[in-house]
Amino acid sequence: MLENPINTLYPLNEVFQTIQGEGTYTGVPAIFIRLQGCPVGCPWCDTQHTWEQRAEDQVPLTAIVEKPAASSTWAQATATEIVALLQDKKYTAKHVVLTGGEPAMYDLLELCEVLESAGYRLQIETSGTFPLRVSPQTWVTLSPKVDMPGGLLVRADCMNRADEIKYPVAMEKHIDELDNLLKVCPPRAGVTIALQPISQRPRATELAIQTCIERNWRLSVQLHKYLHIE
């Protein structure tokens, strides 16, 4: 536990327990902590309700637990309050996914350390457009967003820190974008590269499968959407 906690307030959109449906940890029981706020602006984003942090949408902490999907309401909580909430809900999962929105907008070190001290393993899902302020043990799932409306660049330090690179694809130009990114900002040796078809479109899925076979990459298929779970 931190010797001198600074009691950072984190803006939370929702907290829920489910099965991780993407990437290396697919199939693992997980607690998702979704943070509010994102300036990246991906057109296909399925959590656009997390983009803005409007004062009129702020609610008490208990109101964002397992709430109806696609709600823009959010609450503030310290790391200690978040752990207490997970324990109060008696969640059994020990894998915690920090997602968003864009969670790397915030300094997450205190949250990571408090959660790890309570026995949780951490994973962050990020676009790589903000510096990563997480614990050394945190598994970094980087889904780099290139040429998005927000105009933010993928950071070389995020590419180098990633444990897996999970890239959304729908057409050949997305493969070309990834190739260029890997050339300009090479990841560290041995990192897992996975292609994820956007919105499970058949042509996107076919392209992803073909490319993964050709390059010995991994396919990520958003299992939770096929199973119709959150």
Image: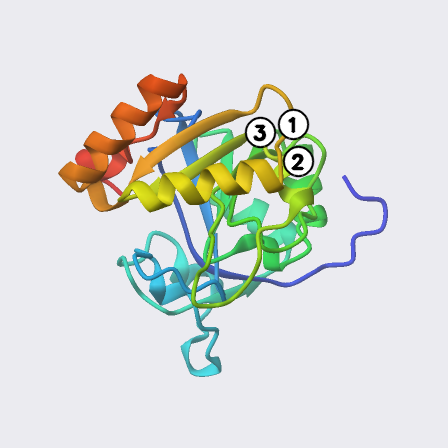
Q: Position of residue 126 (x, y in %)?
A: 52, 47
Amino acid type of the residue tagged 3 in the rendering: Asp
Structural distance between the alpha carbons of marks 2 and 1: 5 Å
The span from disc 3 to disc 2 (Cα, nearest Å) is: 9 Å
Tell which circle, 1 or 3, labels the residue nearer the N-terminal end: 3
* Comparing labels 1 and 3, the label whose residue is closer to the camera: 1
First in residue order: circle 2 vs circle 1: 2
- The answer to the question of whether label 3 and label 2 lie on touching residues, with beta carbons closer than 8 A, is no
Q: In which quarter of the image is residue 162?
A: top right
Which residue corresponds to the image point at 66% horizontal and 50% vertical from the top-left? Answer: 108
Q: Nearer the viewer, mark 3 or mark 2?
A: 2
Residue at the extreme right: 3
Q: Pointer 3: what residue?
A: 163
Against 90, residue 8 (above or below) is: below
Q: How many C-alpha atoms fall within 10 Å of the one at disc 2: few (<14), some, or many (≥20)?
A: some
Query: In terms of depth relative to the viewer, which is nearer, 3 or 42?
Result: 42
**Residue 134 or residue 146, whichever sits in front:** 146
Disc 1 element: loop
In the rendering, at what x and y percent does residue 168 appear? 36, 42
Q: Can residue 98 be seen in this view?
A: yes
Secondary element under disc 3, as helix, strand or loop, is loop
Q: Dots 2 and 1: beta carbons under 8 Å?
A: yes
Q: Can residue 124 be seen in this view?
A: no
What residue lies at 41% left-to-right and 41% top-to-bottom?
176
Q: Left of 52 or right of it: where is 83?
A: right
**103 w.r.t. 87: above or below:** below
Residue on which the image places disc 1: 188
Percent position of residue 90, x then y: 44, 37
Q: Which residue is the site of mark 2?
A: 160
Specify the color scheme: rainbow
Q: Classify residue 174 by image quadrant.
A: top left
- Amino acid type of disc 1? Arg
